[in-house]
């Protein structure tokens, strides 16, 4: 890849291997890079150890979503999902084991991007949200689509599962967070976040770019401010005063981590206080992942508007960067 392409690269997605020793990252050129965390974290590390052990083109368009199952890496391109064996990827072999189209489109102009995927452990199904305004549910055992959840009036940016309540949550360009009963496929609640004065930021729009849950609590943000909601009362309890739009947020111990517009990871307290903002190499950030699959390689990784994936061995500073 030439210097111009590198200059315009963005990292959109990441996923750790089931063993936690490897990291896959997807970019805007349809490429997936696989990095060895054990090599990058070794005491006698070299520059080569911070480069991919394998890079391959997985899709024609950007790789907006990556997700790991017990043995496969799932990647989402425009209207399709591919599966790659982790045991082969770690041996530097990329062989497509499954390719599934989300639905039959009449022409390439109608093929929507897939923005988000998550697994519902209750029935081992894959929940997919993207550009056709619908949530698709795929059986991971046989690759068959078994349900379509309809209700959003614009494309879907994010999906997550609230496992204990058998609920799927989705956020979209229409400004709504919808809560679905995963057993019936019915929408049980719809929160229009931008209609709440404490959250609204009309200058940024109403779109919801990130949704995540922890028991009875939900984090969501995008155009509206990043906010913490109590899901039993369906009301916001904390608003985080962060500049720009947040693209991904996560609960981590007694804190909230968030990335978006701005060259930093924000550390927030549950009460709404922004405790710290830790510098990163990219000017704008798209993806944040914490590796809980391996205690030995427990790192936070962040990617955005350059060819780097910043690695934090300690949440208070960037240790080094992996790069495409």
Image (cartoon, helix red, strand yellow):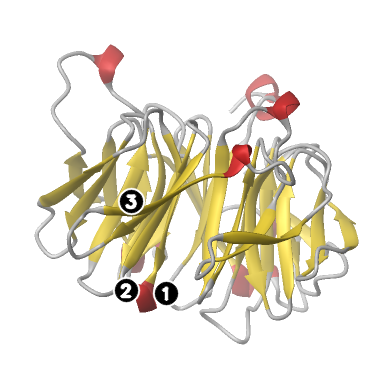
The residue that disc 1 covers is 18
Of the numbered discs 3 and 1, the one sitting upstream in the chain is: 1
The residue that disc 2 covers is 70
Q: Is residue 60 above or below residue 190?
A: above
Residue 213 drawn at (x, y percent): 52, 66
* Separation (CA) of disc 3 from disc 1: 17 Å
Cβ atoms at labels 2 and 1 below 8 Å apart: yes
- Does the image show residue 14? yes
The residue sitting at 65% across, 27% down in the picture is: 205
Q: Which corner quadrant holds the N terminus?
A: top right
The residue sitting at 51% across, 66% down in the picture is: 231
User: How many numbered tags mark residues here?
Assistant: 3
The residue that disc 3 covers is 94
Disc 3 residue crowd, few under 14, some 14–19, many 20+, Cα 10 Å: some
Q: Nearer the viewer, mark 3 or mark 2?
A: 2
* Separation (CA) of disc 2 from disc 1: 6 Å
Disc 1 residue crowd, few under 14, some 14–19, many 20+, Cα 10 Å: some
Name the image quarter holding residue 254. Answer: bottom right
* Separation (CA) of disc 3 from disc 2: 17 Å
Task: Please tell me which residue lies in front, 305 or 253.
Answer: 253
Furthest-bottom residue in view?
295
Task: Please tell me which residue lies in front, 287 or 32.
Answer: 287
Of the numbered discs 2 and 1, the one sitting upstream in the chain is: 1
């Amino acid at each position: 890849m030439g210097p111009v392409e590198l200059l315009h690269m963005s990292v959109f997605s990441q996923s750790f291997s089931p063993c936690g020793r490897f990291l896959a990252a997807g970019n805007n050129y349809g490429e997936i890079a696989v990095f060895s965390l054990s090599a990058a974290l070794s005491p006698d590390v070299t520059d080569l150890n911070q480069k991919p052990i394998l890079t391959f083109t997985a899709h024609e368009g950007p790789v907006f979503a990556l997700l790991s199952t017990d043995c496969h890496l799932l990647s989402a391109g425009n209207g399709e999902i591919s599966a790659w064996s982790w045991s082969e990827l770690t041996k530097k072999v990329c062989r497509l084991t499954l390719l599934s189209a989300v639905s039959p489109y009449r022409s390439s102009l109608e093929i929507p991007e897939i923005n988000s995927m998550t697994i519902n452990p209750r029935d081992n199904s894959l929940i997919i949200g993207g550009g056709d305004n619908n949530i698709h549910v795929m059986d991971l055992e046989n690759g068959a689509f078994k349900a379509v959840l309809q209700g959003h009036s614009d494309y879907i940016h994010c999906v997550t599962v609230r496992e204990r309540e058998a609920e799927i949550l989705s956020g979209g360009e229409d400004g709504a967070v919808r809560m679905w009963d995963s057993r019936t496929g019915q929408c049980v609640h719809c929160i229009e976040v931008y209609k709440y004065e404490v959250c609204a930021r009309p200058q940024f729009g109403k779109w919801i770019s990130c949704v995540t849950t922890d028991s009875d609590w939900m984090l969501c943000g995008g155009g509206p401010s990043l906010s913490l909601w109590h899901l039993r009362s369906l009301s916001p309890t904390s608003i985080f005063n962060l500049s720009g739009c947040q693209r991904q947020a996560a609960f981590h111990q007694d804190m909230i981590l968030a990335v978006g517009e701005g060259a930093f990871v924000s550390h927030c307290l549950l009460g709404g206080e922004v405790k710290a903002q830790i510098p990163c190499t990219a000017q704008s950030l798209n993806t944040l992942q914490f590796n809980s699959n391996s205690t030995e390689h427990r790192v936070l990784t962040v990617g955005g508007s350059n060819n780097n994936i910043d690695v934090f061995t300690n949440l208070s500073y960037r240790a080094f960067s992996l790069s495409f």
